[in-house]
Amino acid sequence: MNDAYLLIEQSKYLEGTLEVSGAKNAALPLMAATILTEEPCIIRNVPNLLDIKNMIELLSDMGKRIILENSTLYIEGPILNKETREDIVRKMRASVLVMGPLIARYKSGKVSMPGGCSIGARPIDQHLKAAKRMGVNIDIEQGFINLNATYLNPIDFRFDMITVTGTENVFCMLSTVEQESFVRNIALEPEVINLVEALKQMGVFIEIDKPNRTASIKGTRYLKGFDIEVIPDRIEAGTFMVLALATGSKIKIVNLDVNHIESVLEKLEIAGAKIDILSPDSVLVYPKSEKINPLYIETLEYPGFPTDMQAQFMSLLSMADGESTIVENIFENRFQHAQELARMGACITIHSKTAYVKGVKHLKGAEVFSTDLRASAGLVVAGLMAEGKSIIRNIYHLDRGYDHIEQKLEKIGAKIKRINP
Ligand code: EPZ
């Protein structure tokens, strides 16, 4: 499976409709939250991705009964085994999301330490700091985190930095603590809010003060099941929009939530895209002219410009009419796609967390290697822009976050094929 690759040829002036799938980073915490109850939980609009399959395997291995039917997950039953499978955690960092629910419901668990990944060390010190504050004993040995607690205290906790899965884990940890807790400097990503909705259905009282990034939480001893719809994947939607501008195409994008990607829409319009909002869940994107305007981009926590869109914009801007600046504030090593783009003729220099992208007239097809999930999407965009043929290897990264992107793009006329030698 690992030696499959994508064969892409320059594809311009495409026309058609692209459908956005459910958000991976919303579905994963929702699946982990089912650990909090034995009652049936229903999760709708689940994307068909490798990471979802991994989480299904992880939870089944822990005892959950799971059925996946037409993008809907039915999950119920008790946890019989509180130890996560190391092989799954190694390949999917998001497995750390089972830690919070295990603490809340079983006050014990054994979670394998998530490895870093190519975009950074990605420690979980904040998750553990909050757990300790609640009275959880944490013992790390042989790459495993052994958790146990007799009693969970309410906390007034401030994150040292904004962390998406850290926020999600702490909300779950507190969901059975009846006294009121306060969590400060929380992440406000739409995926976090999707999880909050489910926790409220389970019986948790959560109030989010968005301007102050503060949550007040009152849990309950017995949590009920939930029935929730996964929000659309704002990063897949943004990737399709970048692709429309990058290839001079007129593309209708449906099943998205325009309110979740305001910062991306704003940058795309400055870069030269016309974005007609047809309804709250559909847009028509096309270029105002042949020119792509250079941009200044800083990645920030939501609602700022998403780090998960950085690679896609770097590909787009590699053929802009001028020099762009991209500052990556979230991860310490998230410019690896730059060297792959350089193999296609892009002109990018990097100084610590800033990339300077000097637009060139043409990119030339080349053989490139994906390094992480979103970088591979950026390489697909570049492959469609570049003259001639490109080969993208290590596309298992792509399959983690995009539901067979080549099938969706082929339907609107893109020359892109998955080759399984
Ligand atoms: C989530 O990762 C997403 N994953 C990421 O998507 C996304 O890029 C990231 O948020 C930022 O938006 C999921 O939701 C499953 P963070 P997460 O904790 O939660 C540092 C994908 O595959 N940090 O918000 O792991 C950390 O190193 C991924 O779709 C600590 O230092 O990211 C990073 O520099 C790519 N200590 C920054 O904070 C901690 O305890 C933000 O990380 C936690 C985080």
Image: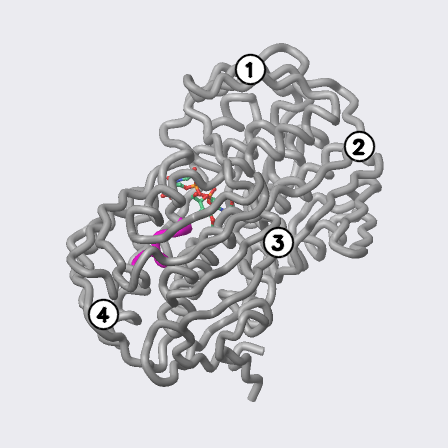
- Quote the CA–CA distance across marks 1 and 4: 48 Å
Mark 1 falls on what kind of element?
A: strand
Q: Classify the position of the N terminus by image quarter.
A: bottom right
Q: Judge whether 318 appears above or below 276 on screen.
A: below
Mark 3 falls on what kind of element?
A: loop
Q: Amino acid at mark 2?
A: Gly
- Say which label, 3 or 2, has the lower sequence index: 3
**Viewer-proximal residue among 174 and 391:** 391
Lateral position of residue 368 relative to residue 398, left or right:
left
Classified by dominant secondary structure, the portion drawn in magenta counts as helix
Mark 4 falls on what kind of element?
A: loop
Q: Judge whether 16 appears above or below 200 on screen.
A: below
Residue with the mark numbered 1: 216
- Say which label, 4 or 3, has the lower sequence index: 3
Determine contact: label 2, label 4, CB under 8 Å: no
Q: Residue furthest bottom?
A: 421
Q: Name the residue located 58 percent from the left edge and 67 percent from the top edge.
A: 408
Ligand 1 located in image quadrant? top left
Residue with the mark numbered 4: 346
Q: Amino acid at mark 1?
A: Ser
Label 3 or label 1, whichever lies nearer to me, is 3
**Viewer-proximal residue among 268 and 84:** 268
Residue 139 is situated, as x and y percent measured from the top left of the image, at 53, 38
Residue with the mark numbered 3: 21
Q: Name the residue located 57 percent from the left edge and 54 percent from the top edge.
A: 89
- Say which label, 3 or 1, has the lower sequence index: 3
Mark 2 falls on what kind of element?
A: loop
- Quote the CA–CA distance across marks 3 and 2: 24 Å
Q: Amino acid at mark 3?
A: Ser
Q: Answer yes or no: disc 1 within 8 Å of ligand 1.
A: no
Residue with the mark numbered 2: 225
- Quote the CA–CA distance across marks 2 and 4: 51 Å
